[in-house]
Image: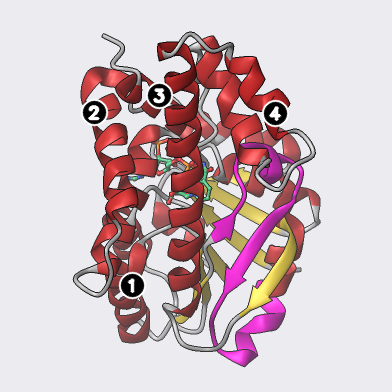
Amino acid sequence: MTTVAFLGTGIMGHPMAKNLVRSGVELRVWNRTRGKAEPLAEDGATVAGTPAEAAAGADVFVTMLADGLTVADVFAAANVAPGTVWLQMSTVGVEWVGKLAELAKAADVVFVDAPVMGTKVPAEQAQLQVLAAGPDDAHKKADAVFGAVGSNTRWLGTEPGTATRLKLVMNAWVLALTNATAESLALARALGVDPQLFFDVMTGTGFDVGYARMKGPLMLDGDYPASFPATLAAKDARLVVEAAGDAIDVAGTAATLAHLQAAVDAGHGEEDMAVLYRAVAKEA
Ligand code: NAP
């Protein structure tokens, strides 16, 4: 039986780990805040006290952590054995994916760059889309994990970074949709237009979009239970801006980042990214 170590059981990692253990693998889970990993014991996972305890003897090592620095720290603490397949599923950006691949190489660990598309509910329903890049001989072990957490895996090549670059492209889109939804709804309210008309008019048209329907109601209710925390969305916007560099003008993403950062600075970082509405609408 394959033994999988799963590091990071937050909003995404917890349901992913749950689906993984239910698929029949032997699962060891670790999370900095242990209480978030403990419920997984009921599903048959072993809760480890340290990253190294989780990684000891595992065939596959999965990271689903906040950012590149956190992933690097946890990898360093885990003492992953040579030959282990490392599925790096957190969103870390172009610069960090290169550094992490180097760390893996130095430890003789097989690195697979594997960020995901989808949020909390798709993670619960094992409907994530996995974007993957890594050596051909790692595919079999990787696919067993990806198949348990997602509905679709796109292998994009063998070079680390290939999947992360596509992930940034998709995130630029998701961030833009969230910011655009906030601006249209805030504008509706500022102009005395019933915001429901925004949704009514788009129904059945080419400019209808599921993301507006997902994030819009949160903005209108002013209640933002996190599917994707604003702090991490700000991190992702920053990764897009950094990756674009001087090559192209991503003023739209930069504006989204400013709205997200204002919401984070006002103490709303743990709430859903839709909370950027507060900055757009200039709510106190
Ligand atoms: P989350 O619930 O905030 O999870 C973050 C995880 O990182 C938690 O396990 C957290 O541990 C851990 N962590 C943070 N700082 C740490 C540190 N210094 N040392 C050790 N562990 C640390 O967020 P999430 O949404 O699951 O995000 C996880 C990753 O998935 C991120 O890279 C995110 O960008 C990516 N992602 C998210 C979504 C989404 O819609 N939510 C979609 C696609 C990809 P604690 O529990 O102890 O804080």
Q: What residue is shown with label 3? A: 277
Mark 2 neighbour density, 10 Å: few (under 14) some (14–19) many (20 or more): many
Rendered location of residue 204, percent (x, y)? 79, 39
- Local secondary structure at mark 4: helix
Tell me the quarter of the image containing the C terminus: top left
Real-space CA distance between mark 3 and mark 2, rounded to the nearest whole angstrom: 10 Å
Mark 4 neighbour density, 10 Å: few (under 14) some (14–19) many (20 or more): few
Q: What residue is shown with label 2? A: 262
Q: Which residues are magenta?
A: 116-142
Real-space CA distance between mark 2 and mark 4, rounded to the nearest whole angstrom: 30 Å
- Seen at 56% across and 87% down, the residue is 157
Real-space CA distance between mark 3 and mark 4, rounded to the nearest whole angstrom: 21 Å
- Inspect the magenta stretch and tell me whether residue 49 lies in it: no
Mark 1 neighbour density, 10 Å: few (under 14) some (14–19) many (20 or more): many
- How many marks the image carries: the answer is 4
Asked if marks 1 and 3 touch (Cβ < 8 Å), the reply is: no
Q: Which mark is first along the chain, 4 or 3?
A: 4
- Seen at 25% across and 34% down, the residue is 261
Real-space CA distance between mark 1 and mark 4, rounded to the nearest whole angstrom: 46 Å
Q: Report which quarter residue 123 is drawn in.
A: top right
